[in-house]
Image (spheres, helix red, strand yellow):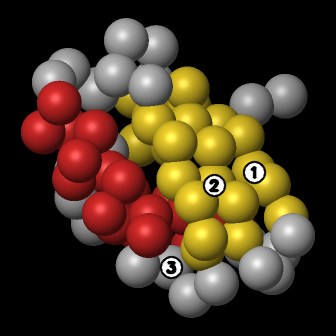
Amino acid sequence: MSTTRFSITNITCAACVKLSTAALQKIHGVTHVVVDMETGASEVTAERNIPWSEIENALTGVGKTAVLSV
């Protein structure tokens, strides 16, 4: 299992969380997604190492921006 932690900018409502979560769950191998509405803090757990570009592309497709946590 692989876990990636990052932030999603411009999360302003429950619909944003739902949309972002659904987009991330479509990535092949993803088993669990958490998105915090108040902070944008997010976590993706997957059966494989997900390339950062796949996370970025999934969120860009729904109008969101991902920022990798350091």
Q: What amino acid does circle 1 point to?
A: Thr
14 on left or right of 10? left
- Quarter holding residue 6: top right
Residue that carries the numbered disc 2 in the rendered image: 44
Q: Residue at x 29, y 26 (%)?
A: 10
Q: Nearer the viewer, residue 17 or 64?
A: 17
Q: Position of residue 42 (x, y in %)?
A: 56, 37
Q: Are marks 2 and 3 in contact (CB under 8 Å)?
A: yes
Query: Please, what is the three-letter code of the amino acid marked with disc 3?
Result: Ile
Identify the secondary structure beneath mark 2: strand
Task: Measure the C-alpha gap from mark 1 to mark 2.
Answer: 5 Å
Residue contact at pointers 1 and 2, CB within 8 angstroms: yes
Image quadrant of residue 5?
Answer: top right
The answer to whether 54 appears left or right of 50 in the picture is: left
Residue kind at label 2, given as amino acid type: Val
Secondary structure beneath dot 3 equals: loop
Q: Which mark is residue 4?
A: 1
Quarter occupied by the N terminus = bottom right
Residue 60 seen: no
Q: Residue at x 37, y 12 (%)?
A: 38
Residue 44 location (% of width, % of height)? 63, 55
Disc 2 from disc 3: Cα separation: 10 Å
- Extreme top residue here? 38
| Image quadrant in which the C terminus is located | top right
Determine which residue is flagged by label 3: 27
Whether residue 45 is visible to the viewer of this picture, yes or no, is: yes
> What residue appears at the point 81 percent right and 81 percent down from the top-left corner?
48
- Is 63 placed left or right of 66 in the picture? left
Q: Quadrant of residue 30?
A: bottom right
